[in-house]
Amino acid sequence: MNVFLRVAEAGSFAAAAKHLDLARSMVTRTVAGLEAHLGTKLIARSTRSLRLTSEGAVYLERCREILSLVEAAEGDLAGNQFQLRGLIRVGVPLSFGVRHVAPLVGEFLASHPGLDLDLDFDDRRVNLIETGLDMAIRITSQLDPTQVARRIGRARFLTLASPDYLARHGRPRHPAELAQHECLDYTGSSRPWAYWVDGEWRQVPVRGRLRANNGDALLDAAVRGLGICAQPSFIAAPALRSGALEVVLPEYPTPELGIHAVFPGNRHLSARVRAFTDYLAARMGDTPSWELNLPPQTLAGKPFSA
C-alpha cells in the first residue's frame, strides 16, 4: 500500500523508487503484485505517463486512511522514540504561503528528517479529497462549519491608500464614501467590503477599473497611487511600516480573519500532519509576527457574522 501510495503521489515509478530508496524494478513488481492480489488494474501505464484508474483512485483513498491509522498506532506505542516519516502535501494561498509559510519549513524539516513536505501554492479552494492534499491553509472571516479545521492564527483586513492618492482624491471619512473612489478589488470576490458601523455590519459595494486575483498585485497598485485596496495585515504590514501606504477609515473595524488548517473530512489525521499543524500554530498564534509594531488603531478587527 505504501509503495502504491508513493507511486500515485509522485506520478512515476522512478520518482517513487528514488524516494523509497528501492530499485525501480522492485517498485514496479510491488504494484503489479498488489494489482494481481486485488484482481484489478490500479494504474494505467503508458510510455510517458501514468494515471490512476477509477478503481485505483478509490483504493488510494482507502490506503491513505489505513496507513495514517497504522502510523498513529505506532506513534502511540513508541511515544517520543517514534520518528515521523512520510510525505505531507499542503495547499497554501500564494501570497501568505510565500511570505509566511515558506520561511518556516526549513526548521520543521530539520527537526523531522524522516518527513517530506510538498507545498502547493494556489489561491483556489480545491477539494482536498480529490487533489490528495493532507491539509490546506484557509484564510477567511467565515469558515464553513462542516469543514474539519483548526485555527492556527489570525490577521486583520485593512483599508489602505497611498499618500499620493489621498492627496489627489481626498480621504474618505465614512465607508459609504468609498463609492466615490477608485477601489482595487479581488477578482472572484462577490462580497462587498464590510465595516462595523453604528453597532452592526454594513456591506459596502465598491467599484474600480482594476481587479486582480492576487493580493500583492493589488497592494503594488495601491502603492503606485491607483486606488484604495482592502488587504490582510500579513500582506500590508511592510508597506504600512515604510509609509508607502496609510490606513483609511481606522475608526470603522473590519472583519477579523481566521487562519485555519483544514483537513479532509474522510481521513484520520496522521501524526505527521498533526505535527506540522502544531508547528504552524506555535509560530503564528494570536500574536502574529506580521502585526508587530503596527499602530493599535490599525488592527481594530471584529469577528464577522453575515
Image: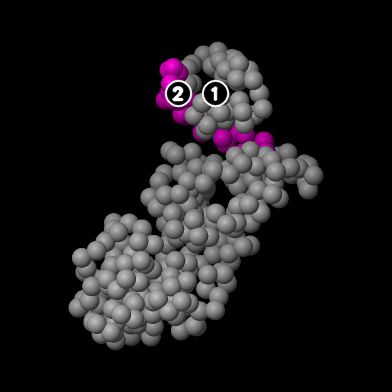
Residue drawn at (20%, 78%) of the image: 180
Asked if disc 1 and disc 2 are in contact, CB closer than 8 Å, the reply is yes
Q: Earlier in the sequence, mark 1 or mark 2?
A: 1
Q: Position of residue 293 (x, y in %)?
A: 54, 79
Element class at badge 2: strand
**Quadrant in which the C terminus appears:** bottom left
Q: Which mark is residue 13?
A: 1
Residue drawn at (48%, 52%) of the image: 92
Q: Nearer the viewer, residue 223 or 138?
A: 223
Number of residues whose C-alpha sits closer than 10 Å to that of mark 2, classed few (under 14), some (14–19) or many (20 or more): some
Give the image quarter of residue 15.
top right
> What sort of colour scheme is used for the picture?
one colour
Residue 1 appearing in the image: no
Q: Is residue 55 above or below residue 150?
A: above
Horizontally, is 26 left or right of 183 in the view? right
Q: Is residue 273 magenta?
A: no
- In the image, which residues are magenta? 44-72
Horizontally, is 262 left or right of 280 in the view? left
**Quadrant in which the N terminus appears:** top right
Element class at badge 1: helix
Give the image quarter of residue 113.
top right
Give the image quarter of residue 195.
bottom left
- What distance separates the C-alpha of mark 1 from that of mark 2? 9 Å
Residue drawn at (49%, 21%) of the image: 42
Number of residues whose C-alpha sits closer than 10 Å to that of mark 1, classed few (under 14), some (14–19) or many (20 or more): many
Residue 165 appearing in the image: yes
Magenta stretch, main secondary structure, is: helix
Q: Position of residue 247 (x, y in %)?
A: 39, 80
Q: Which residue is mark 2?
A: 50
